[in-house]
Image (cartoon, grey):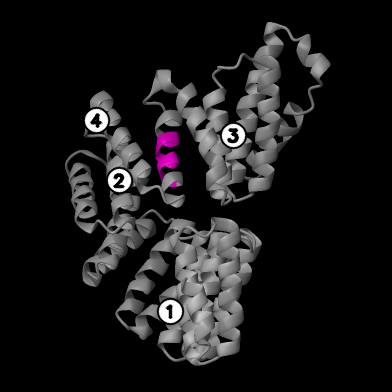
Amino acid sequence: MTHFFSLLFFIFHIGIAFSQNAIEKMSIKDSLNVAKSLDSLILVSQTLVSNSDFDSALMVISKAEKMTEINFSANNKFSGLLNYTHGLALQNSGKAEESEKYYLDAIESSANSDTSFVHLNSMKNLALVYFELGDHSKAESLNLETLELIANRLGKENIQYVNALRNLGTLYHKIEQFDKADTLFEQALLIFVNNLDKNHPEYIDLLYNFGSLNKSKANYQKAIELYKEVKKLYEMQTNINTLGYAESVYNLGEVYMYMNNFELSEPLMMQAKVLLEKIRRKDSKCYSRCLNGIGLLYDRAGQFEKAEESFQANLSQIAQSLGKKSSEYATRLNNLGLFYLNLGQLNKAETTLEEAVAIYASVNGTENTFYATGIFNLSNLYSEIKEYEKAESKLV
């Protein structure tokens, strides 16, 4: 694997070494070589995105885009894939709003092949972007459009259709339309049982999402059943040193936490944390969830020093991976402020909650639920310390 990535980066350095004058004089053979270099650049950028090295990925994408502009017409075979990859890098680095343009361009440039990887995945990811931006209507509409497109062109007994069902079900789960989500997940599972191979990664993703839905519905026994099946599938495939396996272990531990079963929850959560550190995925969302979850677990168990330590570690991790000017960082600050408030540490609570609100205002603006929640919590704090004028001013 090391040799493979070394080769990719070797190709990458060759690809960006072309001077503009040399490119202008290219023969057909040279054009083919440039095309191969572009393929390699795109592959390298996607590898960097998967490894969460977004700055390097965007740098590689920029080089590829410049090469494309010099050598090919506006609508060329690389346009869709480059725009999709650019959108993917921005979205995964927390810049959802900036990614919208690139996904729209990818969808437009791949319109003649509307069941291609680029077209379908750009539609899927753009729906996620709209959800992140709070436009649930656009997200639902795009998911429904994708589902209908696949059904009409490819039928309903294939992985693409199952994936579209799962994406729409996940959206309904997030906006708390649980019955709709449940129906879609059940439909997707039935297609797998009757027509598809359960060893496909999509089956694991489906079980994971269905487990998360049942966890949200407080149907914990069903959630445990589904999460255990996910964990078992990873173990059968000997994929235990992976992010997916770590997530399955953590999810199981989290459900036990909600059931107040500390003895079963703690070792699973700690196992997930250690595994993520072992495979060097401290930059992942799962590691962030893990640190936060461990903090919540210790808070529930009355082990407040351990809880604070884990919450603070989570803040540091998010600051490194997403930066302090991010909604995720503000949300964790808000939760830490509530933790201090519940402990009666009012000065710490005030400082932390005020910082969270300030970040929400600068990152998300003041017309959204994040900011409103932060203001509500800060107002409650001021009421607690009997500063009623401050409390009232925050709610006005």
Q: CA distance from mark 3 to mark 2?
A: 28 Å
| Secondary structure found at label 4 | helix
Q: Mark 2 against mark 4, which lies toward the viewer?
A: 2
Q: Are marks 1 and 4 in contact (CB under 8 Å)?
A: no
Name the amino acid type tagged 4.
Ala
Q: Choose between 389 and 192: the one closer to the eye.
A: 389
Q: Choose between 107 and 201: the one closer to the eye.
A: 107
Residue receiving disc 2: 168
Name the amino acid type tagged 3.
Leu
Q: Is residue 43 left or right of residue 233?
A: right
Residue receiving disc 1: 267
Confirm whether residue 307 shows in the render: no
Q: Is residue 8 left or right of residue 165?
A: right
Q: CA distance from mark 3 to mark 4?
A: 30 Å
Q: CA distance from mark 1 to mark 3?
A: 38 Å
For label 3, the crowd category at 10 Å Cα-Cα, with few meaning under 14, some 14 to 19 and many 20 or more, is some
- The numbered mark, 2 or 4, whose residue comes first in the sequence reads 4
Q: CA distance from mark 1 to mark 4?
A: 44 Å
Q: Which mark is residue 43?
A: 3
Q: CA distance from mark 2 to mark 1?
A: 34 Å
| Secondary structure found at label 1 | helix
Name the amino acid type tagged 1.
Pro
Residue receiving disc 4: 151
Q: CA distance from mark 2 to mark 4?
A: 14 Å
User: What span is in magenta?
Assistant: 121-128
Q: Position of residue 271 (x, y in %)?
A: 47, 73
Residue at the (29%, 66%) spot, across then down: 216
| Secondary structure found at label 2 | helix
